[in-house]
Image (spheres, rainbow, N blue to C red):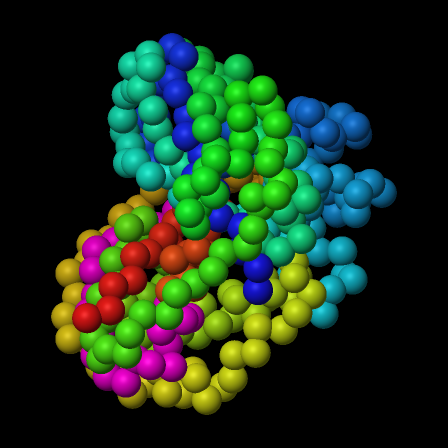
Amino acid sequence: MEIYPFLFEFEAITPVSFMNYPGITLRGGMGMSMKRALCVMGKDRDDCRSCILSNTCAYARVFESPNDKNKRAMKKATHYPHPFVMTPLFEGPVNYDKGDIFRLSFNLFGNSIKDLQYIIHSFIKFGETGIGKERGKFRISGILHGNDLVPVYSDSGDIDYTRLKPLTINTPPVLNKVEIEFKTPCRIQKKGRVLKNADFSEIIKNIVRRKENLSALYCETLAGCSKDLISKASEIRKVSENLKWQQLSRYSKRQGNRMPLEGFTGTAVFEGDLTPFHELLKFSEYINIGKNSSFGFGAVNVQFR
């Protein structure tokens, strides 16, 4: 599976305030700006599934991701997982003064790299409109490739397409202990029940399922993860965990109500034969784990010992 990692750097032009979890504001602002710029069917259309242009519209592909019934994966889903993950590299609430820099990790999957120009344009327009009641303005001060931090975008608005290379994941040395830091709320369900603790088997199941779906939807390939890998996960022992539960919410215009955004943050340490899971766990740092990943939820840092 191909992942294109980016680091967006923004500069506050006027004071900018994030009143809650920044991913909610940044994702919502990007989507609203993209719809205003690209949707030709009018602001009152909320469901891209009924639009005859959904297969050719970057907004529908990137932000709404409706199930077009033309893919092998997720036949029963109304919407596909989004082809991106954005994770703010700062916490809210927070205030930025004029000239301050704030950063965002933004990863694109597979063929969605073709929509990078629309995503950049949406952030530009979002910055011109501003954030919150005070309409704090900001601009893109730089975009770097997330793998080697090479600039891929200039102030003149040009994208250096020669530097848009997919991520390479370095497999760490074979060790028998791993610490997973859940940097943003991680929400995992097991048989319809939300887990309040870190369960290694369920974490691996979630990563495998997510990788397989993203590979089939956006890379037109199969991830190749076997059932044997999932069964081996039950042999890994939890050594310790230090977690806390966080609960937020956001208003979903599409569903017409407030949606819970919840999950655990903190760390969990596991021990056992981790060799089969090395690459998969490092991979999870770029696709996130659990629900609401496009908001930056389920962001993890994996350290082998």
Residue placed at 41% from the left, 37% from the top? 104
Looking at the image, which is closer to me, 47 or 220?
Answer: 220
- Across and down, in percent, residue 82 comes to 58, 50
- The magenta stretch spans residue 269: yes
Say which quadrant the N terminus sits in: bottom right
Residue drawn 78% across the image and 62% down it: 70
Q: Is residue 141 magenta?
A: no
Q: Is residue 226 among what the camera can see?
A: yes
**Which quarter of the figure has residue 21?**
top left
Q: Quadrant location of the C terminus?
A: bottom left
> What residue range appears in magenta?
259-281
- Residue 27 % position (x, y): 49, 36
Task: State left or right for residue 134 relative to residue 163.
Answer: left
**Can you give x and y, in whole percent of width and height, for residue 135 in the image?**
44, 13
Question: How many marks overall?
Answer: 0
Residue ID at (42%, 47%): 148
